Image (tube, rainbow, N blue to C red):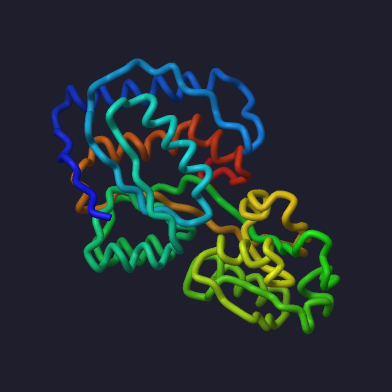
Amino acid sequence: MHLSRRRASASATRRTALATAVLTAALSLTACGAIGSPSSSTESPNATATNAGANDQVVVFAAASLQDAFEEIADNFQRANPGVSVVFDFQGSQDLVSALSEGAAADVLATANNSTMDDAAAQSLVADQSEFTTNVLTLIVPAGNPAGVTGIDDGTLDGADLVICAPEVPCGEATRTLATRLGVTLDPVSEEQKVTDVRGKVASGEADAGIVYTTDAADAGNAVEVIALPDNDVVNHYPIALTRDTAVPDTAQAFVDLVLSDAGQAVLAKYGFGAPAAK
């Protein structure tokens, strides 16, 4: 899809107005208190209306595991800034970096591990990065657990159709690290480029088991059953950054600021993400 955007003004007045609107939204969200289950949307923030960034479009490249949380954060951001729109491309992190290196237009990049963001930085595709959340892996099986899988290190996966992420994407890299630490050899029937595809194959019954992030297991609801992984200290750290070629730096930075704010962190926690290591 061709995305047309107006270049953001660099004026201090506009930046201040946009930052004020986002901060007001963040304070309003924080004042709402506890947030409900992922099936319920966060209440609309009572932000002061502003024309700052009007008609700007922020294109966000984000890891597939972030979809539900980021869409809710974007809804809050757009309510606080009428006329501003946020457009997403949710894929495996490495695919997003590859797209950027091939000339795809984006304003913000959020990946599911540091090494993928470091790859983008090495290619001068992004500016300074900030860690904004964390995630860990778990094992899921279809509802009813027809294959009788009880773990990844007890032999019950032998002969079962296991699906995992490909090693070049963050969830696959974490899966490989986990298997090494547990001293097990995994024999998957397929390796997927997106963790959401792993979840989908298990939820549909196409696979007997899959290794996904805990957030994806929660998103699957009653379609899957969760089996905790032993001694799971393999943590994925999620960084976010503006792209070097963003056409709307002020508006894009305001979106990043909302993700990093207490209000943004509350939305991420609602969907099962952990706090960034720095907090």
Which quarter of the figure has residue 226? bottom right
Classify the position of the C terminus by image quarter.
top right
Q: How many labels does the image show?
A: 0
Q: Tell me: 173 left or right of 5.
A: right
Q: Position of residue 275 (x, y in %)?
A: 57, 43
Q: Quadrant of residue 253?
A: top left
Indicate the position of residue 220 as horizontal and vertical percent values. 66, 53
Q: Where is residue 171 in the image (x, y as percent from the top left)?
A: 55, 65
Q: Is residue 63 above or below residue 256?
A: below
Residue beneath the point at 62% across and 51% down? 215
Viewer-nearest residue: 190 or 123: 190
Question: What residue appears at the point 79 percent right and 75 percent down from the top-left corner?
Answer: 153
Identified at 32% across, 21% down, the residue is 20
Quarter residue 119 falls in = bottom left
For the N terminus, the quadrant is bottom left
Classify 96 as above or below 45. below
Query: In the picture provided, is 34 more to the left or to the right than 5?
Result: right
**What residue is drawn where x is 72% and y is 64%?**
139
Relative to 103, say whether 135 is above or below. above
Q: Please provide percent x and percent y for residue 9.
A: 14, 33
Q: Is residue 1 left or right of 183 when viewed as pictured?
A: left
